[in-house]
Image (spheres, coloured by chain):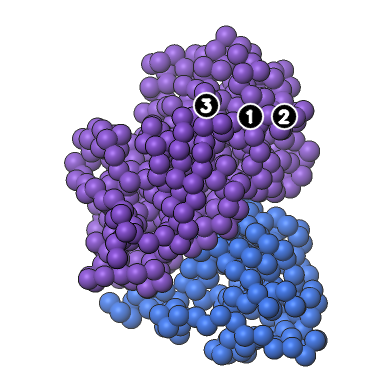
Chain colours: A blue, B purple
Amino acid sequence: MILKGKAWKFGDDINTDEIIPAKYLVTVDAKELGASCMDGITPGFSKKAAAGDIIVAGKNFGCGSSREHAPIAVKGCGISCVIAESFARIFFRNSINIGLPIFECAEAANAIKEGDEVEVDASKGLIRNLTREQVYKAKPMPEFMQELIAAGGLMKWVVNKK
Amino acid sequence: MGYTITEKILLAHTDRKSISPGDLIDCKVDLCLGNDITAPIAISEFEKAGVGKVFDNKKIALVPDHFSPAKDVKSAEQLKVLRDFAKKHKIKYYYEIGCMGIEHALLPEEGLTMPGDLIIGADSHTCTYGAVGAFSTGVGSTDLAAAYVRGRVWFKVPESIKFVYSGKLNKWVGGKDLILYTIGDIGVDGALYRSMEFTGDAIGRLPMDDRFAMCNMAIEAGGKNGIVAPDETTVKYVRETSKRSGKKWKLYKSDKDAVYSQVREYDVSKLEPMVSLPPLPSNAKPVSQVKDVKIDQSVIGSCTNGRITDLRIAAKVLKGRKVHKDVRCIIFPATQAIYLRAMKEGLIETFVKSGCAVSTPTCGPCLGGHMGILAAGERAIATTNRNFVGRMGHLKSEVYLSNPAVAAASAVKGKIAHPEEVI
């Protein structure tokens, strides 16, 4: 799977209240949540981001609450994947469980600048910065998590197993 | 090589003979929790899977505590999703308004979280139950849906960090101050993916309510779980609470040769009450260094500090005093049982006479839900657990975190204050 889009940069410790403020948690609809994605830090983000665009952030992305609405909102707003130096653990689980591709890569998180054109080869974990002609290698996903992703998320895996 | 308490509990819930940090394991769960924000997604995923029955309707808890009593039509719809699911599947531990409390205060009180249990909850503060010597951690809604089907959940075995607290605590200093101090020391990702084990003579002297407050905030350091090995205080507590549930328990403790990725030792005998400045819980400072910070609101409650010990401390500071004319002080007893006890002890009367508003149990303003939202430019001190930008309302409002004594003293002074400035 090849993911391609423009990079939107965020800093360290981006929390779930910034990704999707609690006032929007009265729905489970991905499109509706997507319209308010990143509203707690960049109001109007969903209008600026185009389908396929990529969020690039520092360490501990998605810290705070367990709300799955956060990765759902990111996916719902058309973001193709998130690259960060590190992820908070519940956000990490949730992303894998719902099938939002995420990549841990400090080098990419530092080198990519806002607006850079980025292309990701998801299966190989290769991140190409087309603007700066650089290539970064993301931390490989453990086999079990690849199995979950290949199944199409946790629920599909669970049902297959039953 | 020995095991930590966390490793022992995890191992006991697998089919394996041994585990070590980094292993991906499949564990049986003893209880899985959802609330009115997270369970609707889990329920929809569960129904979509079309598997029919839940794995065990006596191991599922549903607590409608976040936007409840319903704050608007949309939250009423979400609450109804829980109610209908609970009826359809005869979920034993569903708590309707009137019996409901804030989940992480309610479940231990109901005797549903026992030492040695493995508990998951679609709420990040599920780590609270580590206070009774259980392994408990927050997961997402899809994890919860999968657990409804299988009664199992996948985990990566975490490394453990041991925290050793020694020394006698000063007056007005408690579990909340210890955890704010700790997060201030290691940062909001200082324990990322790892287990936080709280030990030392100062922990041994802490009452249960303070241990709950500490484990509750393990997530604010990125921790997978917070845990205190059970001792006499724990056993006395669960002996009482288990009468309600009939649940059994198993006591675990870390081996002497258990392996830790880090050991941090703190002499806490000189620790002052701590205040965490916005916008991160790690911006922790002794209250004496937080000068001339005027407040508009003081919130005393939440899954961190809405227990009876917290209310007693707040009442001690507020008794015979008035809330400052420019401050709204709102108090949230965390459960109905705590509310009733506070009433019997005269605490509610103290609060009302002081000019506080007292609410039915709810998460309310902690996550910017309802019952005390801040306007642009307003500032609150709160005994809650997060002070992120806009957490309690407008993006241009601020939250300072503290213990109940400081929040009560600040309500009286109109600015952030040490309890001794009031008493």
The N terminus of chain A - image quarter:
bottom right
Element type at mark 2: loop
What residue is rendered at 46% in x and 21% in y? B312
Give the alpha-carbon distance from disc 1 to disc 2, as whole Å. 7 Å
Res B119 visible:
no
Please tell me in which quadrant of the rendered image residue B334 appears: top left
Q: Which residue is mark 3?
A: B170
**Whole-percent x, y for residue B107 in the image:** 35, 42
Q: Is residue B53 above or below residue B293?
A: below
> Is disc 3 in contact with disc 1, using a CB cutoff of under 8 Å?
no
Q: Which chain hosts label 3?
A: B
Element type at mark 1: strand
Q: Earlier in the sequence, mark 3 or mark 1?
A: 3
Three-letter amino acid code of the residue under disc 1: Ser
Q: Report the side of B221 relative to B106 (left or right).
A: right
Give the alpha-carbon distance from disc 3 to disc 2, as whole Å. 25 Å
Q: Is circle 3 on the same chain as circle 2?
A: yes
**Whole-percent x, y for residue B95 in the image:** 36, 41
Q: Which mark, by number, is residue B295?
A: 2
**Mark 3 closeness class: few <14, some 14–19, many ≥20 residues within 10 Å:** few
Please tell me in which quadrant of the rendered image residue B343 appears: top left
Q: Which mark, by number, is residue B298?
A: 1
What residue is rendered at 55% in x and 53% in y? B221
Q: Earlier in the sequence, mark 3 or mark 2?
A: 3
